[in-house]
Image (spheres, rainbow, N blue to C red):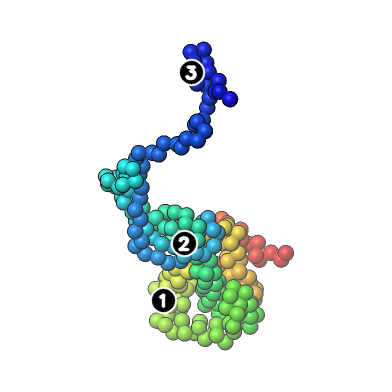
C-alpha cells in the first residue's frame, strides 16, 4: 500500500519507514561514577535497611559514544545496592531500622532512670513499673536490682543525678538534663507526634506509680517533653491526662 500524500505530494505518513532504524544521537552527556565509601542505610525506595555506596562522578560530553569534554562534577550521591536508586547524602541522616530500635530502647531506659533518680527507688511499685517499662522497650533481662544499682552508681559519679547544691530548684542537676537531651533529641525528628508522646507518658506512669508527681518528677518530665520537641502546653496536657484514671 502506497503512503497517503497531500495536495503537493507531501508524504503524510507518520513514523519511520518500515525497515529503517532511528538515527543514533551524535552526542550525549554521561557520568563516570567512583565509589568513595560504603555502609548500611535506610533506603527510602526499598523501605528497609540496605547496603549503599557513596559515589562521586564527573560529567562528560560524549560524541558518538566517545567521552571528550568535561562538564563538571556530579554528586556526591548515595546509591542503594538493591534498587540502584540515587539519593542525596542527607539520606544517611535517617537511622537504620536496627539503629532506630536501639535509640528508642535507650531513650525509654534513660527516661526511666531519670524519673527514678528524681523520685527515689524506695517504692517497689515505682521500681516495678520502671522495670516493666524498660523490659517492654527491649531490655528484656532488666531487674529491679539492676536499676537500683545503676541509680546508686550514677548518683555516686560526682553527683550527676543529685540535686544541684548551688541551685536547689534544679532537682536533678544540669547533668541529668544533658543526659536526657542526648538520648531524646536525636530520636525526636524520626518519631511521629504519637511516638514522642508515648515516651513522655511512659515516664509519667512510672512517676505516678506511688502517687502524685513530686516537684522533682514534674521537673524531669518537663525536661523530657522539651527534649522530645513537645511544647510546654502539650507536655502539661499529657502529664495531666496520665494522672486521670482511664
Label 3 – label 2 distance at C-alpha: 52 Å
Asked whether the viewer can see residue 157, the reply is yes
The image quadrant where one finds the C terminus is bottom right
Q: Is residue 86 left or right of residue 234?
A: left
Query: In the figure, 5 relative to 228: above or below?
Result: above
**Residue 210, x across and y down, in percent:** 64, 76
Identified at 42% across, 54% down, the residue is 88
**Residue 130, x across and y down, in percent:** 60, 77
Question: Which structural element holds mark 1?
Answer: loop
Tell me if mark 1 has few (under 14), some (14-19) or many (20+) residues whose alpha carbon lies within 10 angstroms of its own.
Answer: few
Q: How many marks?
A: 3
Identified at 40% across, 81% down, the residue is 158
Q: Nearer the viewer, residue 54 or 120?
A: 54
Query: In the figure, 178 relative to 126: above or below?
Result: above
The image quadrant where one finds the N terminus is top right
Q: Are marks 1 and 2 in contact (CB under 8 Å)?
A: no
For marks 1 and 2, the one nearer the N-term is 2
Q: Which residue is mark 2?
A: 81
Q: Which residue is mark 3?
A: 10
Q: Are marks 3 and 2 in contact (CB under 8 Å)?
A: no
For marks 3 and 2, the one nearer the N-term is 3
Viewer-nearest of labels 3 and 2?
A: 3
**Residue 9, x across and y down, in percent:** 49, 15
Q: Which residue is mark 1?
A: 165
Label 1 – label 2 distance at C-alpha: 55 Å
Q: Residue placed farthest to the top in the image?
A: 7
Amino acid at each position: 500500500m502506497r503512503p497517503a500524500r497531500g495536495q503537493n505530494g507531501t508524504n503524510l505518513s507518520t513514523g519511520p519507514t518500515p525497515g529503517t532504524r532511528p538515527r543514533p544521537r551524535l552526542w550525549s552527556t554521561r557520568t563516570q561514577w567512583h565509589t568513595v565509601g560504603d555502609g548500611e542505610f535506610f533506603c527510602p525506595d526499598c523501605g528497609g535497611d540496605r547496603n549503599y555506596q557513596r559515589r562521586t562522578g564527573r560529567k562528560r560530553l560524549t560524541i558518538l559514544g566517545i567521552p571528550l569534554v568535561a562538564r563538571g562534577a556530579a554528586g556526591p550521591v548515595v546509591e542503594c545496592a538493591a534498587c540502584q536508586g540515587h539519593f542525596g547524602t542527607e539520606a544517611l541522616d535517617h537511622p537504620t531500622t536496627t539503629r532506630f530500635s536501639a535509640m528508642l530502647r535507650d531513650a525509654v531506659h534513660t527516661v526511666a532512670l531519670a524519673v527514678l533518680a528524681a523520685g527515689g527507688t524506695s517504692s517497689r511499685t515505682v521500681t516495678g513499673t520502671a522495670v516493666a517499662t524498660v523490659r517492654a522497650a527491649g531490655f528484656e533481662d532488666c531487674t529491679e536490682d539492676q536499676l537500683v544499682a545503676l541509680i546508686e552508681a550514677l548518683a555516686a559519679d560526682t553527683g550527676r543525678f543529685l540535686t544541684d547544691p548551688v541551685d536547689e530548684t534544679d532537682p536533678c542537676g544540669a547533668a541529668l538534663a544533658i543526659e536526657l537531651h542526648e538520648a531524646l533529641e536525636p530520636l525526636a525528628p524520626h518519631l511521629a507526634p504519637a511516638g514522642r508522646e508515648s515516651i513522655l507518658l511512659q515516664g509519667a506512669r512510672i512517676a505516678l506509680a506511688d502517687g502524685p508527681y513530686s516537684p522533682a518528677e514534674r521537673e524531669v518530665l518537663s525536661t523530657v517533653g522539651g527534649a522530645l520537641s513537645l511544647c510546654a502546653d502539650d507536655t502539661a496536657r499529657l502529664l495531666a491526662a496520665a494522672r486521670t484514671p482511664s
